[in-house]
Amino acid sequence: MFVIAGVTGNTGAVVADTLLAAKAPVRVIVRDAAKGAAWRAKGAEVAIADLADVPALTAALRGAQGAYLLVPPRPTAAEPLADNRAVAAALAAAVAAARVPHVVLLSSIAAHQPDGTGPIVSVHVAEKLLAEVTQLTAVRAAYFMENWAGALGMLAQGALPTFIPRGLVIPMVATKDIGKTAAAALLEGPRGDARIELAGPRDYSADDVAAALTKLTGRPVAAADAPLDAVVPTFTSFGLSPAFAGLFREMYAGLISGRVVWQGGAARAIRGQVDIADVLGPIVAGR
Ligand SMILES: NC(=O)c1ccc[n+]([C@@H]2O[C@H](COP(=O)([O-])OP(=O)(O)OC[C@H]3O[C@@H](n4cnc5c(N)ncnc54)[C@H](OP(=O)(O)O)[C@@H]3O)[C@@H](O)[C@H]2O)c1
């Protein structure tokens, strides 16, 4: 039995669908029973649990040969890192109690850094806690291609504001590739404590993203550098908490300074198949 968290989100849905397509036994974790119905119809078992609720999560994980777990974002939290630390501790406690032999964790580029990476600190903590209680495969994902959906507000004016300076080439990955890679890691089983560094088919700059948008819209789109000081006001204007916005400022600063990079070493580097245009196409078409 494979137990999958986050199935109403980007990556968990792909993990569960990929495993179901491979005829593997799947149990999904949802917080809201109504959201489980679609999964039951697809042939999955459904467990109801909040990832911070150790008894419910332990029950949901019982009998699992492998589990896909994540530390969900807390966009409106006053103290997102503290909340995420509590979730990470709950994940580890439940995995230990249910004796799950293998966990595939959605982690991030730069998860080896203990600080100075903004929200990535949460998966640094989760990796540490889980590695103490199970065999961990950390899928360290690059910057999500889907993040660009939040920067398309000025597309009609031909502008793509970016906190990643225009010429800076960084790894990016589609959530579909993350889900497929995580499902493959679950089916493959534990390989000791393992790290996968997962990027898309190539690395991209904001100029590359603007070029993809130019092709998709048929009108010129140009990336425009936005200063780091604009991160917090921009994110809070979208309704995110000042603390969460501050973490993102730190992450963008880390991308610029070179702190948010791959660890390398013994990690398995994998390149996915989904290109930035494949991700942005449906987003642009749906606007
Ligand atoms: N964005 C990036 O560039 C990036 C890069 C590397 C790694 N990451 C990691 O990716 C994560 C997001 O992954 P994603 O995009 O697949 O997720 P997502 O689409 O943001 O969805 C979050 C999922 O978690 C569930 N969830 C939230 N809080 C929960 C709780 N307390 N208990 C149980 N389930 C809960 C949600 O279910 P409901 O329907 O109940 O809300 C939803 O299914 C981030 O948190 C970060 O750790 C992000």
Image (spheres, rainbow, N blue to C red):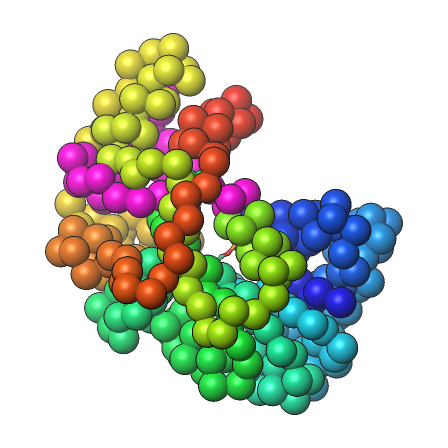
Q: Position of residue 218 (x, y in %)?
A: 38, 10
Q: Residue at x 51, y 44 (%)?
A: 177
Is residue 86 found left or right of 254 in the rendered image? right
The residue lying toward the viewer, choosing from 228 and 265, is 265
Membership of 171 in magenta stretch = yes
- Residue 89 in magenta? no
The residue shown at (34%, 12%) is 219
**Residue 63 shows in this picture:** yes
- The location of residue 169, given as percent across then percent down, is 22, 39
For the view shown, which residue lies furthest in the top direction?
A: 218
Q: Quadrant of residue 214?
A: top left
Q: Position of residue 82 (x, y in %)?
A: 40, 79
Picture layout, residue 286 above or below residue 243? above
Q: In which quadrant of the rendered image does the N terminus lie?
A: bottom right
Residue 158 placement: quadrant = top left
**Is residue 227 shown above or below 133?**
above
The magenta stretch is: 148-177
Residue 238 in view in this figure: no
Horizontal arrangement in the rendering, residue 1 relative to residue 118 (left or right): right
Q: In percent of the image, x 47 and y 86: which residue is there? A: 132
Residue at 56%, 59% in the rendered image: 185
Q: How many marks?
A: 0
Above or below, 207 against 158 in this view is below
Q: Using the image as rendered, state which of residue 58 and residue 157 is in the foreground.
A: 58
Residue 156 spot, x, y in % from top left = 36, 20
